[in-house]
Amino acid sequence: MQAYDLAGADGLVSKKRGRPSNRRHSEDFRNLVLDLVREHYADFGPTLAAEKLLERNRIAGRTCYVVSFGRVPCCNIV
């Protein structure tokens, strides 16, 4: 409540907002996955694309991560 008393509603907003995630992947990895999805799995749904990336390319990741490339993000990954 001290933050609210000092800064009002703005004091309740997380200080981490707008900062990059600590868990984000490198830009090279992101571009690799993006290229693979666009080239081989563009018409796949997010779950199938993630499964194929794991099966054929040995790239494991969250389904949301795959969806976020070139599409609307389904979670906090941009």
Image: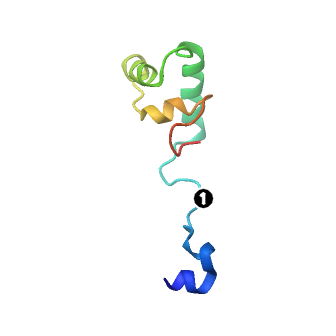
Q: Position of residue 66 (x, y in %)?
A: 50, 30
Q: Is residue 56 left or right of residue 15?
A: left
State the residue in front, 65 or 26. 65
Amino acid carrying label 1: it is: Arg
Tell me, what colour scheme is on the image?
rainbow
Secondary structure found at label 1: loop
- Counting from the top left corner in percent of width and height, residue 41 is at 52, 16
- For residue 31, side relative to residue 54 (left or right): right
Q: Is residue 65 left or right of residue 54?
A: right
Q: Is residue 77 above or below residue 2?
A: above
Q: Vertical placement of 42 versus 27: above or below?
A: above
Looking at the rendered structure, the number of numbered marks drawn on it comes to 1
Q: Residues within 10 Å of mark 1 (few under 14, many from 20)?
A: few
Q: Position of residue 6 (x, y in %)?
A: 60, 86
Q: Which residue does the numbered mark 1 point to in the structure image? A: 19
- Residue 24 percent across, percent down from the top left: 51, 46
Quadrant containing the C terminus is top right
Residue at the (55%, 72%) spot, across then down:
12
Q: Which residue is at a point 60% across and 39% down the rendered structure image?
A: 27
Q: Report the front residue among 29 and 41.
A: 41
User: On the image, which quarter does residue 18 sit in?
Assistant: bottom right
Examine the image and state in which quarter residue 34 appears.
Answer: top right
Q: Looking at the picture, does residue 35 appear above or below residue 19?
A: above
Residue drawn at 51 percent across, 37 percent down: 74
2 versus 62 height, above or below: below
Query: Residue shown at 51%/86% (left/top)?
Result: 2
Q: In the image, is 44 to the left or to the right of 8?
A: left
